[in-house]
Image (cartoon, rainbow, N blue to C red):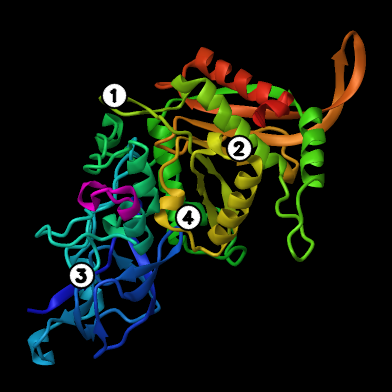
Amino acid sequence: MPINILMPALSPTMEEGNLAKWNVKEGDRVKSGDVIAEIETDKATMEVESIDEGTVGRIVVPEGTQGVKVNALIAVLLADGETPSALGDATAPAAHAKAAEAPAPVAPAAAPAPAAPAAASVAAAAPVAEKGERLFASPLARRLAKEAGLDLAKVAGSGPHGRIVQADIEAAKSGGAAKAAPAAAPAPAAAAAAAPAPVGPSDAQMLKLFAEGSYELVPHDNMRKTIARRLTESKQTVPHFYVTVDTDLDALLALREQINGAAPKDKDGKPEYKISVNDMVIKAMALALKKIPAANASWTGDAMVVHKVVDVGVAVSIPGGLITPVVRNADRKTLSAISNEMKDLAKRARDRKLKPEEYQGGTTSVSNLGMFGVKDFAAIINPPHATILAVGAGIQQPVVRGGEIKIATIMSVTLSTDHRVVDGALGAELLQAFKGFIEKPMSMLV
């Protein structure tokens, strides 16, 4: 019988997406693994692979369609031997978009799990197919698993539709989860309660406050809706606590100049890396969490999740919002590796080409507004993280040293913490460790 291809859930926060492009047309033959479409989510433009083999019998949702709900019918695949008459009465895309709508996620959990998977040809929540006959893994993941002697059937996939990717193999090799994907942690009880009645004027009432013709309405895109929802959930369900400290940047700036000056050149005569202050902040935060492991944790209703790795999400501004690509194992990487990785992640973030595994998860975040001249600010925690570091500008100002007034470059940083996980004393301890690495930067090279 014909196989329905449904709009896949490509991220935990995805409720709808835009069908940007079809890579196939009606009558085309496809096999498992073929890229059949490109979907724009709230975070990136992603390729969708076919799981089954067959012939494209009908494209229900044309390319360019916006706001297609997760699990809506987008196309129908004919199995071997079937003719177009087997399609029956495939209805209009709008009807399917309304009939198959994924439930919206509630509160952020400590370990986000993929949203409800599509039941047909484009979505699978686990790496093994329903009959246990087929595993979905990237070619690189298969090769790495074979080299490491790993059984793919025992590796949990974190890629789109539960696909096994390189990061999953690396995690399995290092003793990470290798048998089953962890269930999503229970959502905080507060989020399960009914939403309170809105406070303040309605949209219509608010617009009446402005003179007619003095404004224009710009509809929210998927990214802005997702940012608004997640940050509102964070402020409503996570008890924020803030700690601020000033750090002296002079030694770090001097070391940065030395490192960049000694960078080897490529064949075109360009430096192979150029380390920024933000790269050194990422490294210092990672090492601070390694030194204070109790702060490298997340909250769930039943247990504290104490992480064995330090993965730092870094806020990157992109058109229409922001995204936090994650530098994995940042405590173990060199400054040059962090620098080059961040340049690549930031570029692909702005091009909306990041893969879900590159911006999901992480154990902490860094948000830097120093380049905009902001002296200090407090950032909102991005669950499942329990901490986020807000970094201000390095500003020259007078300080007292040895009873004398000197000029120093001072950078203020504010740590926002989930008070259920990191209390005031632990937050202060973490900031002191961070300050130590910033003010004695050579320790980051050891």
Query: N-terminal of the two: label 4 or label 3?
Result: 3
Q: Position of residue 273 (x, y in %)?
A: 70, 51
Amino acid under label 1? Ala
- The residue at 9%/87% (across/down) is 82
Earlier sequence position, callout 4 versus callout 2: 4
Mark 1 residue element: loop
Q: How far apart, in angstroms, are the residues tagged by discs 4 and 1?
A: 32 Å
Residue 282 numbered tag: 2
Residue 363 is left or right of residue 111, and the answer is right
Q: Residues within 10 Å of mark 4 (few under 14, many from 20)?
A: some
The span from disc 2 to disc 1 (Cα, nearest Å) is 27 Å
The image quadrant of residue 5 is bottom left
Residue 323 is situated, as x and y percent measured from the top left of the image, at 51, 51
- Marks 4 and 2 sit apart, C-alpha to C-alpha, by 26 Å
Q: Which residue is mark 3?
A: 121
Q: Which residue is the site of mark 4?
A: 224
- Nearer to the camera, 362 or 340: 340
Mark 4 or mark 1, whichever is nearer to me = 1
- Local packing at callout 1 (Cα closer than 10 Å; few below 14, some 14-19, many 20+) is few
How crowded is the residue under tag 2: few (<14 C-alpha within 10 Å), some, or many (20+)?
many
**Magenta residues?**
146-158
Disc 3 marks a residue whose amino acid type is: Ser
Above or below, 10 against 88 in this view is above
Nearer the camera: disc 2 or disc 1: 2
Spatial CA span between label 4 and label 3: 29 Å
Q: Which residue is mark 1?
A: 303
Q: Is 357 inside the magenta-drawn segment?
A: no
Task: From the viewer's side, name the closer residue of 219 and 85.
Answer: 85
396 is higher (above) or lower (below) than 314 = above
Q: Residues within 10 Å of mark 3 (few under 14, many from 20)?
A: many
Find numbered disc 2 in the image and state the secondary structure of the residue it sits on.
helix
Is residue 91 among the parts visible in the rendering? no
